[in-house]
Structures are given as structure tokens and as C-alpha cells.
Amino acid sequence: CEAHQHLSYPCGHVFLTCCEEGEEGLAPPTIKKKQRPQPTALPKKVLQWSAGNGPCSQQCSVVRGLAQCSCFPGFSLMANGHTCEDVNECVTNTHTCQANERCVNTVGGFVCERQISCSSGYQLRNGVCEDIDECVTRTHNCGMGFQCQNTDGSFTCNPKQGCLTGFTQDSHGNCIDIDECSSVKEPCTSGFNCINTVGSYTCQRKIIMCSRGYHSSPDGARCIDVDECQTSTHRCGEGQICHNLPGSYRCDCQTGYQYDAVRQLCMDVNECWRYPGRLCAQTCDNTPGSYQCSCTTGFSLAFDGKNCEDINECDSNPCSQECANMYGSYQCYCQMGYYLKEDGHTCEDIDECSQSIGNLCAFQCVNVPGSYTCACPPLGYSMSPNGRTCQDIDECAIGSHNCSASQTCFNIQGGFRCLSFACPDNYRRVSDINFSGFINNIFVCVSQICQRLFFFFFFFFFFFFMICLILSRNKVLLHNGETGNHPDAHAHLLY
């Protein structure tokens, strides 16, 4: 611009221009690159100089006293150095549209439009895919014998007349036969061939000839081997194993058999005879094709099937009392006071009282299980510490009698007696003489005269005493009273 001009936006234009002094410039318009300009936009090429721009079509600037032209963004300066032309960003590939967008060039910029594509049978209308009615637009290919029926995105051709089962209409509306053998998947089951007929089809069994040792497969398509071993149609004898072969079979001897060429048979091998003492620890029993080990009584076969282990018979309690296991057997024995019966298992009590083994008890022997006890009479005796003899109970000493106060208790074997006595006049009781044996409790009354003589004549004591005894022997009356709980014994001295 000249010295009296300044750069501004004149009214009605979108380009910067040089304005005279005093002219007011308008606010610069907003240019959006992706908006289509209004129809009033300038053409792509400005051929004439605009007033106020000097020789430039868009922007003018003074550099070192010379006018220099430049263009707005979206434009490029032409070769004449004055005119600006629009840049086609879509051609120069300087746009920023996405892959699914279409670039549309505008004056000074470009816009990106979203591409909309419709499927077959649809058309784009107002940005929306609408169905094409092929029946109305007559774009269908239905024949004369068919009627067009529109569908969503397509159409169908319906026959104007129906065909029977097994037939279908062609493009001309004629009824033709359906080849079910080619159009239907597996119309026949396995082993049958499909044969098409007019309006239908038939299934015919496949026929195949197989050689000996083979038979046809279930579908009749091939020959398969017959397993004679599985179907038990072989002729293998005892001790032989059947091995199936293609179209045949073979017979082999089992383990434990060997082939006898003379008899042409498989004969059993007696392992116990061939290997004596090497197969079993005790007893070897031959079996068809094998052998078996066994053990004698009192042993059981071990887990290895060869050795024998001792059986602890005592675990099953075979004895009534005590059991002792032995190698290969066992022994029953009884506790003291019992004896083992003949069956070797039961213990019976020994009746010690009935056996003649001496006098076990002084009074009575009572047998008890495993032993015996001694018993005494129920009254008057008690068992001695040795447990065999009975000793007399002194009721008078222990105070277990029932004698009255006026009676005197005298102990006897197995009981006691209560005695009461009185001396005659001129006599008194001087002592109690107890004789064990035949005479018990003899009381002697001695006259007072003899006692006086005894006191006066001391040196004649024994002499006079003996005379008094002799003289008074016939004067003594002994009277023994009753024994038991009610004694009534009285002794009287007759003078």
C-alpha cells in the first residue's frame, strides 16, 4: 500500500485490501476450511486488479518501495505474480478427510462428506437407503408363468400354477421333474443306491460279491474281513489260541502247552513234574496250561503264590482257655484246676473232692470251678488258718453261750454245757477239776473235818488226803446236766 493507505477488509469482500485514509475497515470474516462458501464468493481467478490493492488480486504489501502480492490460505499466486487461484486440496492430497469420507473442493478450502453406500436392492435417497421395488420398476427376471413379489432388498418369483409333489416350475412356468438323487442329501440309507424316477425316486440295495473269509460291509460298498476268532467259526482245539488273519485265521498253542507233531495237538505241560521242588515251597498241583501251589494244614499261601506262611490259629480262639501257636499247628492247654478233654479244645473242671488224693479236708470238701474249699460244721467250729482242719469254738471264753448267772459254762467239742450244783451241809466247793477226755467238769466236795485234819497235820497231808478220797469215793454223786442252749446239770454230794 501507499504511504497514505493501510491494510483492511473492505465491505463486501473477503480479501485484505489497501484502504484510503479515513476509510473504516470491517471486522475480518471467519473462514472455515470445511464449509462450502456462499454463492457470492469470488471466482477462483481474479483477473482484474481491485481498487486499493494495487496490482494484487488479494493482498498487497510494500517491500523496499515495491509492491509485492500474496494470497490468502487456500490460494496460490499464479505465475504473473499478481493473480491468486484456488488450491484444489482434493487433487493435491493435502486434505484431512478420513477413508470413509469424500473430499469436496471449495474456494479457499475443502469439505469432507461422509460416503453412504447401499446394498444390492437398495438406493440412496435423501441420505437414506430405501428398498427398490423390482416388481414396480420391472427390473425382475420372472418368466411368463411366474408372478413377481417384492421382498426387502430383493424379489421372488411365485408360480402362477402349482406343481405336483416331485415336480417344480422352470423359468417359463412349466412343471419339470425334481432329481431327488442329486438335489437331496443322502436320500437312501447306507448300502442302497438312489435311482431317480418321474416325480419320485427309488432305493436299490447295492450288490457286491466277496471271496471266502470276507463279507460285504453294511453299506454294501466294500468287502471286509471276517474275524473267525471273534465269531467262533474257527476250528482251534483245546489249549490253542486263535489269531485272525486277512481272509483266514491261525491256531497257536497257549502258554503252558506244547505242540505234539504226532497227535497234531497242543498237549499240556506238567510243570510240577518238569521242575520238581522249584516252583512251590510245599505242594505243586498241575492244572491245564499252568500249575498251582498249595500248602499243608496250618499254613496259608503267601502273596507271591509260591511260599507258605504259618497260620496263627490262636487268632480265631479255637481253645476254651489258653492257646499256644506252633509252627504249622497250635496247642490248647488249661489253667490250674482244669484238665483238657479228648477233643483237645475244651477245658473241664477237676473235682478234687471226688478223687482219691488223700484227706483234703478234716470235715467236708466242697468243689468249686478250678479248685476246692473245706467246710466246717455250721455250729461250734471254725476253720483253722490252714484252711483244711476245723477247730473248736470256746463259747465260754468268747462269751457266746447263754448260761444264766447261777450256772457255770463248760466248753465241750462243738458246743458247751451249763451246769448248776450245790454242796450239802458242812460242805463247800473248793476247786473245779477239768478233765479233758472221758470225764469233764468233775466237782469234788471235801468235808470240813478232813480239811481240819489237813491244816493240823501238815506233815500227814498227803496220807490223810488219800484216805479221805478213798473214804468219800462212794459218797460223790456226779450228775452231768444237759448241753446246748438250755443246760440243766446238777451235782449233789451224798453224805
Image: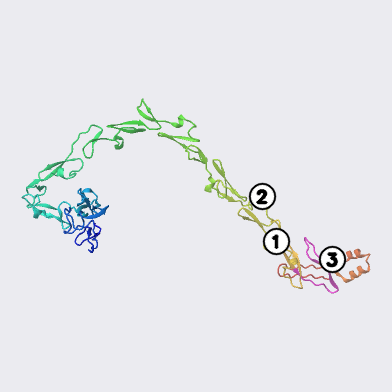
Q: At 35% from the left edge and 27% from the top edge, which residue is drawn?
A: 264
Circle 1 SS class: strand
Report the span colored magenta: 418-442
- 149 is higher (above) or lower (below) than 455: above
Which percent across, then down, holds residue 176?
Answer: 8, 46
Q: CA distance from mark 1 to mark 3?
A: 39 Å
Is 402 placed left or right of 178 in the picture?
right
Q: CA distance from mark 3 to mark 2?
A: 51 Å
Residue 115 visible in image? no
- Which residue position is annotated with label 3? 473
Count residues near mark 2 (Cα–Cα under 10 Å), then give few for <14, some for 14-19, many for 20+. Answer: few
Q: Nearer the viewer, mark 1 or mark 3?
A: 1
Q: Nearer the viewer, mark 1 or mark 2?
A: 1
Which percent across, then down, holds residue 410?
Answer: 76, 66
Circle 2 SS class: loop
- Residue 357's tag is 2
Amino acid type at mark 2: Ile
- Which residue position is annotated with label 1? 382
